[in-house]
Image (cartoon, rainbow, N blue to C red):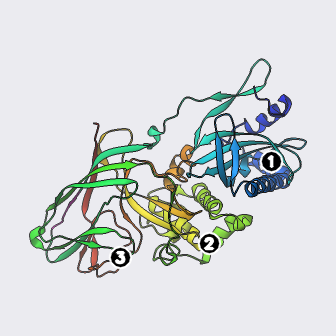
Amino acid sequence: MIKNHLSTILFSCFLAFLSFSCEKKEETAESSKTIQQDQKVSIDEIEQGIKAFIAEKQAENEGFFPVKDENHDLKMKLVRVHTEYLSNLGPNSHFACVDLVDESGDVYDVDFFMEGEPGSMGVTSTTVHKLNGKPFYSWKQNKEDKTWYRLPLEESNNSLLGVVEGRDEFEFYYTAQLPQLEGPAKMWIPIAESDAFQEIELVSKEVPTGTKEIKDGNYGNTLLFFELGPENSGEEISLTYRVKRKEKGPYAAAMPDPKLYLASTKLMPTGGRFEEIAKEEIGDKINDSHLVQARVLYDYIIDNMKYAKVGDYGKGDSNYACDSKTGNCTEFHSFFISLARSVGIPARFAIGASIPSDRNEGGIDGYHCWAEFYADGKWWPVDISEGNKYTALATYYFGRHPANRIELSRGRDLVLNPGPEAGAINFLAYPYLEIDGKEVKVNSKFSFRRSDS
């Protein structure tokens, strides 16, 4: 039974409003509006009280907020206070769900129970409810005496939502068939490379004679460059990779180059309306950390965009995303990067493929892209389009990329030498074929086979 200096009556009243959970409950528009009108001032005061309490404890503990319960002893920093779940339980008694991040970058959802006036609250208890979006317990009511208690959950598994945690190993097959060529043509293909999170071995390569490797100077991408002619018509290009990939979380790095990661690009502009939107959403958090602000922008896009492959999607055009509020992964992450860079948060784009979690071989439905932002001395992975499609994983995808993916290239507006006559390449996953100065689509396919299948 819960006995944290709060009466059964207070818990029962609170559960009627919140069901003691950080899970969002559906409300009618009218009832939601009434709640906001009746509680707006007190909610703001409670939020400020929580933030002040956390700041005070951080000052006393070398910049970290300590969280202890029966299973955890953590040093944390604030990500966000869930204002939608703040509640006044009764006279000077309050509840809040708070997202905090530990030294390793794991995001914890912590339930706070407090007593006292806003601004001078004492925390009667804290319990860690979720780790990277996965709950440790739920709440259940005793039918006899109507009291509430925590109910432990069996270990959850996100694989049905496309996530492989920990590690994954697979072969990745990249194939492309050249069209009929009537004259000279040029083509560029990205080459996957090893880094701290993926170990890449190029097992086999079938390419036309004379193919050479070139480098992208800004982002370090390696590419294959082809000079082609009619004799190459119909040829199939094939690359086979052996991949060992581990789940990606926040990782320490030096301050990134602002000329690259705060810059405006052709389809990811900064400033103007993007700065206005970002500042409006961030509001009074403008003086908070970049980590807090990035979470606000992440939530804004999840709440306001719809994943839909309609219209002029797939270019990663921030203006299109802002106007239509739709798109695929390229629009979601381009919009986020434009907003983040517009308020001084370094952010970057990467693209590759997501490997299915529910089977061990077969085709892959095209490319997938994601983003990272820089805060508190770390790069933080985000996957906003997946967080939008699977809201149960929205917390997971703020700071995590699963193991079942391969990264093919990084960056936007890739400047190459030799490069296309049309100029910089927007981004690169599929082959970029240029004929007479114009891009021509190439029939491309991705497939895979897991090592243990």
Q: Of marks 1 and 2, which one's residue comes earlier in the chain? A: 1
Horizontal placement of 434 versus 338: left or right?
A: left
Label whose residue precedes the other's in the sequence (3 or 2) = 3
Residue at (38% x, 51% y) in the render: 405
| Residue 370 lies in the magenta-colored region | no
Above or below 131: residue 176:
below
Residue 417, position in %: x, y? 28, 79
Rendered view: 358 above or below 64:
above
Q: Which residue is mark 3?
A: 217
Which quadrant holds the N terminus?
top right
Q: Residues within 10 Å of mark 1 (few under 14, many from 20)?
A: few
Circle 2: residue type? Val
Q: Residue furthest right?
A: 91
Residue found 74% across the figure and 22% down from its top: 142
Residue furthest out toward the left: 231
Give the Cα separation between the discs numbered 3 and 2: 26 Å
Query: Disc 1 or disc 2, which is closer to the eye?
Result: 2
The spot of residue 396 in percent (x, y) is: 54, 47
Indicate the amino acid at tag 3.
Gly
Residue marked by disc 1: 35
Marks 1/2: CA distance?
A: 32 Å
Q: Which residue is mark 2?
A: 343
- Percent across and percent down for residue 56 are 78, 56
